[in-house]
Image: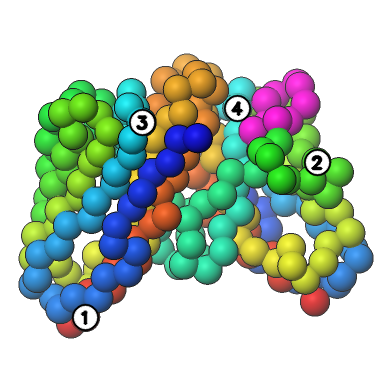
Amino acid sequence: GAVVSQHPSRVICKSGTSVKIECRSLDFQATTMFWYRQFPKKSLMLMATSNEGSKATYEQGVEKDKFLINHASLTLSTLTVTSAHPEDSSFYICSAVGTSGSLYEQYFGPGTRLTVT
Amino acid sequence: TQLLEQSPQFLSIQEGENLTVYCNSSSVFSSLQWYRQEPGEGPVLLVTVVTGGEVKKLKRLTFQFGDARKDSSLHITAAQPGDTGLYLCAAHTGSNTGKLIFGQGTTLQVKP
């Protein structure tokens, strides 16, 4: 089956620093990846759509200069949280859509727990 | 704005009981998906329903897509502690981008 990995699984950083989260499709190519944010016991909130080779599309209210997304290859998208603040602490999840499958098939990564101190 | 209203948001039951989770919208969707998520992990797809009136069964879980493709339900028979988790319904926005909108989620706790 399609596997999506995220690295790191957990990260703690100091306020004001930047942190990069990687999302990889391990056994398929993904032209489109999505980044979500999730608060405890809440649903997933879509942050942005990441398309390989082009700029990401951000949802309303998401600061594109704060949450930098790069999708340089068909198997890797990265989310960089710049100048992190404690309120950026959250669970970040990515998902990927395969190039050969239908748009119905979206595979989720295991998530990254970010804690900003 | 397309919205998915999921209910109930929290459910605590005893092992062996039955339960139903609802996912409603005023919008028509081409498909609807149900996910289960455990703490600290990503969502795992349980089922995709595509046809109005469709019923799919996955062991003790029964999923139904409304005739008008605006709503769906998840019924669990004889719940087990292993069913504990966050259940999410999701639907494609129809923009052909693959973008999903999610319901608010239902946190289910099954007590032994």
Question: Which subunit holds the residue at mark 2?
Answer: A
Q: Secondary structure at mark 3?
A: loop
Q: Is residue A40 above or below residue B69?
A: below
Q: Is residue B6 left or right of residue B110?
A: right
Comparing marks 2 and 4, which lies closer to the viewer? Answer: 2
- Find residue A32 and name its label: 4
How far is mark 2 from mark 3, CA to CA? Answer: 29 Å
Q: Is residue A63 above or below residue B83?
A: above
- Find residue B27 and name its label: 3
Q: Nearer the viewer, residue A99 or B111?
A: B111
Q: Is residue A44 above or below residue B96?
A: below
Say if labels 2 and 1 share a chain: no
Residue shown at 18% from the left, 43% from the top? B63
Question: Which subunit holds the residue at mark 3?
Answer: B
Q: Nearer the viewer, residue A4 or B103?
A: B103
Residue shown at 9% from the left, 70% from the top? B17
Residue position for label 2: A64
Comparing marks 3 and 4, which lies closer to the viewer? Answer: 3
Residue B42 lies, in percent from the top left, at: 48, 54
Residue shown at 15% from the left, 78% from the top? B14
Residue A62 lies, in percent from the top left, at: 73, 45
Question: Which subunit holds the residue at mark 4?
Answer: A
Comparing marks 2 and 1, which lies closer to the viewer? Answer: 2
Badge 3 crowding class, 10 Å Cα cut-off, few under 14, some 14 to 19, many 20 or more, is some
User: Which contiguous range is marked in magenta?
Assistant: A48-57
Q: Is residue B40 magenta?
A: no
How far is mark 4 from mark 1, CA to CA? Answer: 39 Å
Badge 4 crowding class, 10 Å Cα cut-off, few under 14, some 14 to 19, many 20 or more, is many
Inspect this view and state whether residue A27 appears: no
What amino acid is at disc 1?
Lys
